Amino acid sequence: MRSLLIRLVAAALLSLGLAAITSTSSFAGGGTTCTQTNPYTGLCVTTVEVPGSPGTPGTPGDDGPPDTGSGAACYWDGTAQGISSPPPGPVPCQSVDGYWSNTYHCYISAVSPPPPAGDPAWQGHQPGDGGVYNCSQPQTGMLITIWAQDPPPNSGTGPTPRQVAQIAIKQMGLTAVEIGIAPKPGPNSIGLVGMPVWMWAAKPDENSVGPITASASAGGITVTATAKLLHVTWDMGDGEQVVCKTAGTPYKPEYGRKDSPDCGYTYKLSSVREPGEAYTVTATSSWVITWAGAGQTGTIRLDGLNRSTQIRIGEAQVLVD
Amino acid sequence: MTIPPRTRAWATGALVLAAVAGCANNGSDPEPSASPTAVISSPVQTSSSAPPSDPSVRASTEAEAAARKYYAVLDALGSDPKSSLSKLNGVATSTQLTAMRNVLRQQHQHEERQVGSLVVADLKIQSVNLDNSNPYAGKVPVVVVDVCWDVSKVDIVNAAGKSVISPDRPDHGWTRLTVANYRYTSNPDHGWRVASGQDLKQAPCAAS
């Protein structure tokens, strides 16, 4: 029943092409025209292409969603043809009908032997000028004949959705957070053992704390990726780490000796024995990037962005007479 | 019955040639071309008498036979879901072979069966072009044949015996077949296959 339905959809699409030989359906940037009807079924049997201008952030207590795989490089998406069933999704990159092309959404094989000169499949080109290819859509049962100057790209050798997502991530320009910390870094500021230290992302923007979305296209695949900051891991330089799931709260003098509500620390030892008599504090960002494209979704984890500063921590001396 | 020596030699040579051609090529691959010949005529009158010496007339005769055989094989393959589609190689090539193999493969997979046969109600040779200068590129001898078919007695039924044919299917129509011979050098008479087809937008012929 399903196959019949698919063929009926194809027939319906093709009947539009039959109603007027010049009418076309959208296909790979151009359109298609039915050139031959099967007398037995009344359905189109050969179609010629009309050339066109050829994640979820982690919840507290977990480490966020895992990094998923690369995704399939080859995918079916019939939405441009108005076909919603089967839905977009990965397909094998090879079949008996040839290799898969994401550009044409079909399996490609060279017509062998090539059609005789003057055949409509040549689309007005002379034999030897480019080539004629079969474009087979098992999803619809359609066989489309296309002419192309060069063989259509084999999507099986092209980028995976993850690789395209990584292009999008590069476009985002993600950066490590700019460190905001109290006590302030520098020789004229010093914190005290036992006193609260506040850490936060200074000058937060979409590049440093997200969320940020970008799209990229390659190899016939378009992927939209959204990056969200999962957490910032603060290495305090004394062997301890603090994981903050927020950008932190900037310290203001009126807060006095209060603890940070969401991202703070208290040193137990002075930094006098550290190089430069200061602790090196490093903030490392953990990003979760969710991508969607080519009928697939996935998650990429990015944990390497970091920035460091140094703060001095001293011990208060109390003189008792 | 005796056969004169010269006739025997010709007959033996023709048989050997046919056998070699039949074994060496399944109809899908073109053979190297001999010196190019080009004869263009339109339309061509054919006759069913002894093989004519005019190459274009011979080509027309063989192409017409190939077109009729093409539909006969489609009838046979369509009516038997278990039949081997390799029989298509003997009557079709290039885009037509792929297209019809695709159609029949699906039909067989869905256990659909043809009932009745297509009738060739009219057939007209439109042109002959014997340019065989580059079969590998598509410059092959072709005969363009217009076929008016009648499928009023043809139905396609599923495994339950229910028709899967749209009631809007035309019972009559014209298809322009390009019949090509990719093995013209070695097999000028029997290498003709239907290479492509095209709907003709013209009034259907009278029902047979």
Image (tube, rainbow, N blue to C red):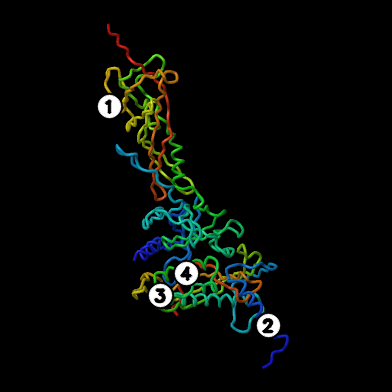
Whether labels 4 and 3 share one chain: yes
Q: Secondary structure at mark 1?
A: loop
Q: Quadrant of residue A260?
A: top left
Alpha-carbon span between mark 4 and mark 3: 29 Å
Query: Which tag is nearer the camera, tag 4 or tag 1?
Result: 1
Query: Where residue A310 sits: x, y (%)?
Result: 41, 21
Residue found 55% across the figure and 74% down from its top = B90
Query: Which tag is nearer the camera, tag 3 or tag 1?
Result: 1
Q: Residue farthest to the top?
A: A321
* Mark 1 touches mark 2? (CB < 8 Å): no
Residue found 49% across the figure and 63% down from its top = A96
* Residue denoted by label 2: B12
* Residue denoted by label 1: A261
Alpha-carbon span between mark 4 and mark 2: 46 Å
Identify residue type, mark 1: Pro
Tell me which numbered mark, 4 or 2, is placed earlier along the sequence: 2
* Nearest the eye: B92 or A121: B92
* Residue denoted by label 4: B202
CA neighbours of label 1 inside 10 A, class few (<14), some (14 to 19), many (20+): few
**Relative side of A219 to A230, left or right:** right
Badge 4: chain ID: B
Query: Which tag is nearer the camera, tag 4 or tag 2?
Result: 2
* Residue denoted by label 3: B113
Tell me which numbered mark, 4 or 3, is placed earlier along the sequence: 3
Query: Where residue A254 sits: x, y (%)?
Result: 27, 17
